[in-house]
Amino acid sequence: MAEVISPAQMHIRRYPFWTLLALLVAGWCGAPAPAQESISAPHVTVRLVVPPAQIYPGENFPAGLDFKMESGWHVYWTNAGDSGEPPAIDWKLPRGITAGAMQFPAPKRLPLGPLMDFGYEDEVVFPVPLQVAADFQPKGAQTSIGGHVTWLVCREVCIPGKADLSVTRAALASAPAAPDVDAAAQALIAKFQLHEPKELPAGDSAQFQSSAKAFTLDINTGTRQSSAQFFPLDETVVANAAPQPATALPNGVELALAKDENIQGVPKTLNGVVELADGTAYVVHATPEAPGAPGAQAALAKAPVMDTLRAAGLALFGGILLNLMPCVFPVLFIKGLALVQSSQRERRELRAHGWMYTFGILVSFWAVVGVLLVLRAAGRQLGWGFQFQSPIFLALMAMLLFFLGLALAGQFEIGLSLTSAGGALAQQNGYTGSFFTGVLAMVVATPCTAPLMGAAVGYALAHSTLVSFVVFTALGLGLALPYLALAYFPGWAKLLPKPGAWMEVLKQAVAVPIFGTVIWLVWVFAQLAGTNALIGLLAAFLLLAIAGWALGRWPGERPATATAVLVVLVAIVAVVGAVRHLGTSPSAAADSSQQAASGWEPFTPALLAQYRAQGRAVFVDFTASWCLSCQVNERVILDSAAVKQHLKDSGVALVRADWTNQDADITKALAGLGRSGVPTYAIYPADPSAQPQVLPEVLTKGIVIDALQSLQSHPQPSAHLSRPTP
Amino acid sequence: MRRLSVAIVLSLAFTLTAWALRVGDPAPDFTGKDSQGQTLKLSEYRGKYVVLEWTNNGCPFTKKHYSSGNMQRLQKEWTGKGVVWLTILSSAPGAQGYMTAGEENAYMAREHAAPTAAILDPSGAIGHEFEAKTTPDMVVIDPSGKVIYSGAIDNRPTTDPDDVKGATNYVSAALTESMAGEAVAVSYTRPYGCSVKYEGAE
């Protein structure tokens, strides 16, 4: 056993006589024994942290036991798990000072082969509340606070340790005017106090059901949680190493916990610490759920197959509707154009083209879903539409469409299948061209996630891989359906006008929505990368125009085509360089001053919680600059005079969540509402246990006003109209 | 979805039960080689009480019971009453607690340990069969082959040898109660100690 020998003991062994003399002298003078506040033991440094410099009657403060471990070494939680023991302190305190129980911050799982322990790595501070009684009498100018600490620190092997730690502090008879406190020590303890599991708030609940070999634990927190971990406080109830499959519920989360195979009977309460996906930890004392109780937990009693089918149906419909969105319409328009021209061809070929287009859409949807699922698994918080948060991607899209627009306007010819842009492959006639046209359609459709699609996408991303793929396949099919229908019923194509001179005019007219899309993309780009990088993009447009001129002046000639390609490459390099070196992230100052003027405050989770704690409902507008429907809703509905007046009268707090750049807090909040994209409009009632009301993506004044009025009819607890102090 | 999760957990638990140790169930039979080179089977001790003691000579919790003489005393006391005491070493080669036959014999001679036999289980097969979690981890089997106790050696989960005196020894209690024809009062506790150093553990 590795017992730690203090320096004092070493001293005694080497100089017995002098030590004895020193002790006698010290004893006479009444000087206290030398205080040792920390100790360096094998693989761990243990320190007693007492922030106040003075001890006086009536003082209450948290002291701390600080363990700093070498990498890979750990100490244990109050329930260490399958092996190990937690640290302990036996206090040696002067009369009048009492210590409460050692507090344990939320632990980590420490797997060890087939076993599972619970503990801490790197550093942990255990806060201990100390109380100085009102009748505390200092005996001398100083007082000593300390105790006997024992611990076990392990990696592959375990090293127990023990030490007597103490600190001396000035002892006063009454509270000083300005108490002196070590701020750094205080902050260290406060940091770990934040990690202590909190009691479940009043509106939340935890209940469990017991089956032969497992518990199902339902935790209701009022918001949907995607996952959670349970750390048992009782030792022989739950199998520590068993996996805990989590099911997200509308109001919380459900965990399946394997029982310890030697568990005796059914426990009256299931006690433990629950750590949610966002890191908050609660102490729960779950009570048995009455069998057959219909709670919100029973919401998933509906057969999951029906839910998936319904989501898939919505996704299909949403995909069809997407064809009308300004993001997609130009491509479909162009495709229809090509169809008009080729309506002379054989039926089979037409159908095959239609299927290749559909296949192109589906493959790109699957590829994106696959990447999203991989990233989701990797723990990143991404939502649908993320690629439009990258300025370089936006610039390249804008350049692509600009080039296409030039061709449509007549500067040069790309050929009959002018729908395919973005590379030599897509410019081919035939099946490959159709395939890549489908890919292009999907790529451009992503930011337009409203209406109907928001819920389906949020649903899919929150559910299993299979469900995600089913929903996204339905979405892709919907997107491809109109063109596929035309390909199958060329009779309908006969309804289209016969080819003629008007086609050239039509082709040139299509350039208009294409250039419109380019303007929108340039606007979003400027928001993201700043006006200096815009120079690079506009210069690239000039280069593209030059390349297009070359292609038009000398059609089909090798040297001209090669030059054009070279110029396009230079344009791309110029843009990337411009974004890298001249790009600035959108200035937060300009945004916030604008927002303050408009009455909308920028979203933070703390702000939301503060307003609700104050008794005020909060209207949160989740938006992004690249989201067209968001901009429309804001300018037409939310900024309209009538709605503004109602918002002001209702006393609801106005918060805007700008998701233009990847924001982890906003992504989390969206996930909590069951959404993964924008626009999303939610009214969070003041009562924290009440469900937030989510408005539809397409707003009307009536919808907003009705929602605000229904809020009034529910009594809000003590509504204050003042802003919270930051 | 909830039913699916429960089904998954149940099926996992079911497979786990295949080699899980349940107090009251018959103990799984095993064949092991002891430090004298003899091959032993658990079933050949049917008709006698058997105590299984998982050990790791480097673990401070094991050292507590050996340096205080507690484990040796228990071994002498109960083997004297006809109990078969098997010390089992499930540490993987290279891990703490692993010993060759010669080293184990020397260790036992030095410590004056007196088990019936010391079984070398470097592959951890016997440990996994009995789900041994820590060293020490104790299992008591009655003459009919049923497990009547599994868990900690006593009720003081510390590394301090002074805590042996005055602790309630669960192994002695189980043996005493069972030999008197009574039901074992405490048949399962959380074993305390260092984790068994199985092959493949970090």
Image (cartoon, rainbow, N blue to C red):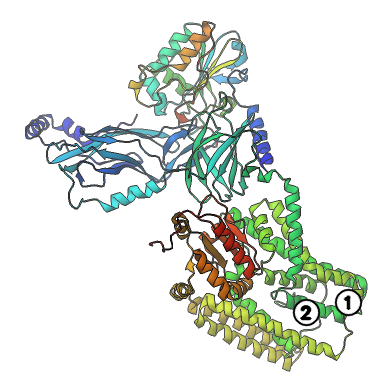
Q: Give the structural element (helix, strand or loop) at label 1.
A: helix
- Please report, as a chain letter, where disc 1 is located: A
Identify the image quadrant of the N terminus of chain A. top left
Image x and y of residue B8, in percent: 67, 38
Q: Which mark is residue A493?
A: 1
Pointer 1 and pointer 2 on the same chain: yes
Image x and y of residue A395, in percent: 60, 78
Task: Say which residue label 2 marks.
Answer: A334
- Please report, as a chain letter, where disc 2 is located: A
Between residue B201 and residue B169, name the one nearer to us: B169
How many labels were placed on the picture?
2
Whether residue A678 is visible to the viewer of this picture, yes or no, is no
User: Which label lies toward us, 1 or 2?
Assistant: 1
Whether residue A437 is visible to the viewer of this picture, yes or no, is yes
Image x and y of residue A120, in percent: 43, 42
- Relative placement, left or right, of A70 versus B93 is left
